[in-house]
Amino acid sequence: MVVNKVGKEIPQTVAENHLLYEGELTHVETYKEASRKIKPVLPNEKKIVGSLKEAIEKTGLKDGMTISFHHHFREGDFVLNMVMEEIAQMGIKDLTIAPSSIANVHEPLIEHIKNGVVTGITTSGLRDKVGAAISEGVMEKPVVIRSHGGRARAIATGDLPIDVAFLGAPSSDEYGNANGTAGKATCGSLGYAMIDAKYADQVVILTDTLVDFPNTPISIAQTDVDYVVKVEAIGDPEGIAKGATRFTKNPKELLIAEYAAKVITHSPYYQQGFSFQTGTGGAALAVTRFLREAMLKDQMTASFVLGGITNAMAELLEEGLVEKIIDVQDFDHLSAISLGENSKHYEIDASMYASPASKGAMVNQLDTAILSALEIDTDYNVNVMTGSDGVIRGAVGGHPDTSKGCKMSLVITPLIRGRIPTVVDHVNTVVTPGTSIDVLVTEVGIAINPKRQDLIDYFKEVDIPKYTIDELKQKAYDIVGEPSPIQYGEKVVALVEYRDGTLIDVVRNV
Amino acid sequence: MVVNKVGKEIPQTVAENHLLYEGELTHVETYKEASRKIKPVLPNEKKIVGSLKEAIEKTGLKDGMTISFHHHFREGDFVLNMVMEEIAQMGIKDLTIAPSSIANVHEPLIEHIKNGVVTGITTSGLRDKVGAAISEGVMEKPVVIRSHGGRARAIATGDLPIDVAFLGAPSSDEYGNANGTAGKATCGSLGYAMIDAKYADQVVILTDTLVDFPNTPISIAQTDVDYVVKVEAIGDPEGIAKGATRFTKNPKELLIAEYAAKVITHSPYYQQGFSFQTGTGGAALAVTRFLREAMLKDQMTASFVLGGITNAMAELLEEGLVEKIIDVQDFDHLSAISLGENSKHYEIDASMYASPASKGAMVNQLDTAILSALEIDTDYNVNVMTGSDGVIRGAVGGHPDTSKGCKMSLVITPLIRGRIPTVVDHVNTVVTPGTSIDVLVTEVGIAINPKRQDLIDYFKEVDIPKYTIDELKQKAYDIVGEPSPIQYGEKVVALVEYRDGTLIDVVRNV
């Protein structure tokens, strides 16, 4: 065993093949950008093919290759399952899949893993049954978990070369100009797919809405696309919003949101032209509502909001409280519509959103971000990946990216969930190092990271209950007791990469 | 001497170091895309620097490197001269400059060449005094002439690696998000600059209009920019339109335009949703006007127009006669405004416009294009580079790209200019091979390339005077006599690359 900078034990055999986490920006260095193989398309050549099978054949996909997908349809995605089923029927094996994330709806993956079609996975997240299967040890090779920015970095540096990207597009013309704002199943931004399109050797666009050439706006360009195939349906728009956009009436969540908004509006960053990211979930959406009220009262506007975008953000834009929306992903239908209609709602790719290896990501310009946690420990390390039972069920998303990039990061979470404490001595899995977290906000009160003495001083007079994080942990333990340690096996089922590609943690089988 | 496929003699010593032209698509093959060196920008780092000198110092520019510029300001450009003067003062020598084109206004280059600051040039065009100096043999190394698509290809394949791109931007924020539609000197599309931004190791944005972060729309993104410097003025918008947009009353030009419009409207490609590119110049603009009348009469609309865009095109868009404008460059102020205001007026980069090595350029989707000529010979080879005196004074632009990509290319030109025949036995310099040209249109009548027997048949009943190209040449010779051959020297002063990177011709000193 070796121990990395956040105190996590990494097995010797794993450590021999990976750089270990040594601090947030230690391994961000000058590099030669990865590049794709390009087969030029000549004047009379067509890209449209008759079937998905024909598209796969034309790419020359074979055993051992890496293919990718995007997760903009979230729980409504049809593309990954459709493509994998076709590939399985064609008898291709030993593939590594590199979707930007994996949802519950991708449960058929378990069969493909068992049948040897899929032998490698890299993703931001794994939910429910697929997560449980991985945690049980269904795969020989560990899954590689990367943040959105980390994935973009890995693609740009060549750590994650993609042979073929299969990208669902709500609309496309026959030459491959595609966007997510027109069509039958609009998902809005194609930010994660845009990166795959630029770096994959070959790109297949799957669409259910073929439009006349030239399709605009162009999120994915003809110059990045090899083949276009029309399919019956690429996704269910209803599935995009699933779970993301409920408006909470839960008093605990509302209290957390109120405290969080208060932290932001009493911080040194709350100035004319400030910027923020709030993400999804009941409490996060409520923060946006409270911020709105404060901004109206204070006659303050924000220069931009970033991230995964919800209609709550689109409404702020319409109201003029926010100057611009910078959008890598939409979490509901209305924000997808806003992207299509409002020129101040702007689509960006995952590298521009969050890559630590880019010439400057948007997260670097962010004042404050609201982040979630399954667990946070007394060193402020955060777990958004594994449950209290040690089973993989979450997604890293932009958590480590945004928290490091912004000037003040807030983790908002109830002190306990059910009979489980959220604030603990040691998180099961470290996804974001405590050095990236500035303030923890719970319904009981807040804790400010001691490294931010400036904020501790600044908030002295602010009327919110303040504690040390040890005190908050003790409050949680006082209510539900100290959690008993999880009994893990010996097998490493997932490697958790920090955004610079170093190993911040591993997940063992349960 | 060796002779290439268009019959041009290439000196042995030159031929030993270059592939020779063997046909339009012979050397377009699968390749590994070139890539840049990226120095990641960390969360607290700033890109704005205090002066141009400081920006140059920070890039570490040194003797022997290659730097690039764009020519969107055309005769109004201040950036190239400003940067070269600073570099000369800093004592840096032996640079290769790779502007997308060179204008009259860049006359100070001659001094930089004489002083050894500039020892290599690659460009699409060379005008007036710089062209004359090159033709006189002021440089030791021949200039490399590339089309717009050929330049994008050379950058993407690694034939033209760029160390530092100095890109003028009408507006930029401090993090490098730039566009050409806001600011003091709006040039509209930044299509040529967008390619340099994506491939150059380092990118410096020069702007006279710094705006709040985040600047949108984003033509050049922060993820492609290393430094931003504010200067007094980057260009004179008046200079952009110089010579490009006059409305002709010349009866000869109007007759040519009328015939050209008739060829288009009587061709098999004139159907609902057709597409065209007309470019600039009096006759070309008149073609657009005649086409407009025909489309109104026939209740026909075009799916898109492409290219260098003028206000004549923007008006067609406003009128609904054209569905979309696909814009790599704007030739006047009003079209730049249209790009900023009309979402159906869409900006693309040079690779997407015309690169033969891309996964499919826009020119491949074009029905018909109107092109110019300084000379055209009886094999339909076209010269747009050297004058009748053999001196370099033109620009290749998109000529070989568009003519090859589109389904029907028209060269429009008066039969004679002054006392000089335009239709000749052999052009001084072959820029576009005759195999790419379908119809020659003069004020006397048209000639259809014999390789297009389909068009010859199709136009049988159309009421335009028709000749063989030999007959048109003879008519020209009958009026002004056969031109006497130019007395060239032995020195090769320019290499003319076809769009695939092969040598289609060389220019010798005069």
Image (spheres, coloured by chain):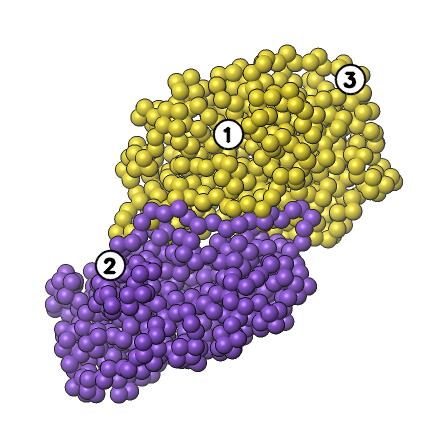
Chain colours: A purple, B yellow
Q: Where residue B226 sits in the image (x, y, percent)? A: 35, 43
In this rendering, which labeled residue sits more in front, label 2 or label 3? 2
Mark 3: which amino acid?
Answer: Tyr
Three-letter code for the amino acid on which mark 1 is drawn: Thr
- In front: A260, or B471? B471
Q: Amino acid at mark 2?
A: Glu
Secondary structure beneath label 3? helix
Between the residue at mark 1 and the residue at mark 2, the CA separation in whole angstroms equals 46 Å
Residue at figure coordinates x 63%, y 30% from the top left: B20
Front-most of B56 and A307?
A: B56
In the rendered image, the vertical position of residue B157 relative to residue B251, given as above or below: below
| Spatial CA span between label 2 and label 3 | 79 Å
How would you rate the neighbour count of disc 2 (Cα within 10 Å): few for under 14, some for 14-19, many for 20 or more? some
Query: Tag 1: Cα neighbours inside 10 Å, few (<14), some, or many (≥20)?
Result: many
The residue labelled by disc 3 is B477
Q: Is residue B452 left or right of residue B361?
A: right
The image shows residue B15 at horizontal and vertical percentages of 59, 25
- Compared across the picture, whether B48 is left or right of A308 comes to left
Where does label 1 land, which residue? B122
Badge 1 and badge 3 both on one subunit: yes
At mark 2, the secondary structure is loop
Q: Is residue B117 visible?
A: yes
Mark 2 — residue?
A22
Image coordinates for residue A417, horizontal then vertical, percent: 28, 84
In the rendered image, residues at marks 1 and 2 fall on the same chain: no
Residue at the spot 51% in from the left edge and 78% down from the top edge: A111
- Nearer-the-camera pick, A335 or B380: B380
Respond whether the residues carrying marks 2 and 3 are from the same subunit. Answer: no
